[in-house]
Amino acid sequence: MLQAACDRAAWAPELAAAAWRTEMAASTERSRRGGGGGGFAGCPRTVKPCWRLAVLLLSVSSLPAVTALVEGLYCGTEVCYDVLGVTREASKAEIARAYRQLARRYHPDRFRPGEPGLEGETKESAQKKFLLVVTAYETLKDEDTRRDYDYMLDHPEEYYQHYYAYYRRQLTPKVDVRIVILVTICAISIFQYYSWHSSYNEAINYLVTVPKYRIQATEIAKQQGLLNRTKEKGKNRRSKEEIREQEEEVIRDIIKNKIDIKGGYQKPNLSDILLCQIVLFPYYLTNYVAWYVSWIYRFTICREEYGEEEKLYIIRRYMKMSQSQFDSLEENTRQSFLEKQLWNKENYEVYRKEQEEEMKIKMATDPRMKRYRRWMKNEGPGRLTFIDD
């Protein structure tokens, strides 16, 4: 067992030396006292301590050595600097030059077996070396990756952190986040514009079929001489279908240009899409701050009287309507708001209660609501039958 301890000392010098001293002291003491307890004279009882020492030394010797070169990280068990044949102090230019030389030598398209310096190399081994050279160059050409790799070589015990740093860089998208955000905003803006344009065309198609607007557009077209039919002869003569299509197009253009559609179906405007709104946000913010300061100064400090525009703004704010919703109201409706002086809070509260009462009366006298209440009373929502009057 003493000889085994000496053999283990090469793997764990300090532990083996301590074990040697302990074993020698115990052996000397047992030899001095002689055998006992069932043992022979001069033959110490060392079976149990020696087995414990052997198990301990075997456990210490089987511990894995801490190394920075891990298979699957960077160049694996090879040092990337040694793969390229450069030192750790090499510059980017030296690394690139070494990479180009090795790439020309081991590239699958340029590899020629038997060339000087490539004795014993096969096409498969050259391809593996080429991939290793590419990996080493990709690791060392980037400053951040090279810094992580050098840290791994200097601190091999932090292998969990090395795994995290390596795979974090591998899985992180290579595209700049700012470019992704810009492309996303542009795509949303394009979709928004075309969706808005489609809604506007639907509104125009509907207004063309409304008799009120169609008659007005026809009168305007006749006044402008756009629908005056002239007698056409010869090859220039058009069919009735062509004349009708032209008249429809004229009426459509007049409705487009003469009728100002408000709300969600209004004419598309580039300044209202998301991209332009973001670009013009500082301008809008500056205007709003200037308007708010002016409002406070004029109507709070100086106590000026409200103008028509200011009165309509206060009414719209009381009604909790957006600007497009408020603009979509008829002109006489907005004038009625001014006549009722709804910019005054007390007047608006009275108007709101009146509207609520009118809505309750309308719902109570509506035949459809009566049928609905009768159905809820007799049938209930659990059945699908409906009894009409």
Image (cartoon, helix red, strand yellow):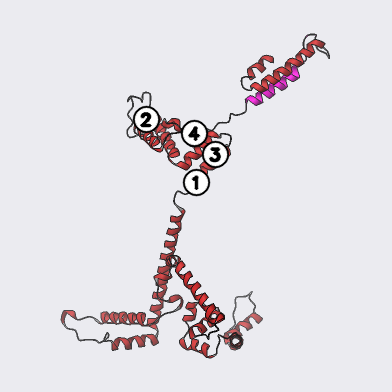
Image quadrant occupied by the C terminus: bottom right
Q: Amino acid at mark 3?
A: His
Q: Is residue 117 magenta?
A: no
| Residue 276 shows in this picture | yes
Distance of mark 3 from mark 2, alpha carbons?
33 Å
Q: What SS does tag 1 mark?
A: helix
- Mark nearest the camera among 4 and 3 is 3
Q: Quadrant of residue 100?
A: top left
What residue is disc 4 on?
A: 76
Q: Is residue 360 visible?
A: no
Closest to the observer, 43 or 301: 301
Q: CA distance from mark 2 to mark 1?
A: 31 Å
For the record, the magenta segment spans 40-62
Bin the neighbour count of mark 3 within 10 Å (Cα to Cα): few under 14, some 14-19, many 20 and up: many
Q: Which residue was labeled with disc 3?
A: 162
The image shows residue 256 at horizontal and vertical percentages of: 36, 79
- Tell me the CA gap for discs 2 and 4: 21 Å
Query: Quick one: label 1, few (<14), some, or many (20+) residues within 10 Å?
Result: few
Q: Which residue is mark 2?
A: 123
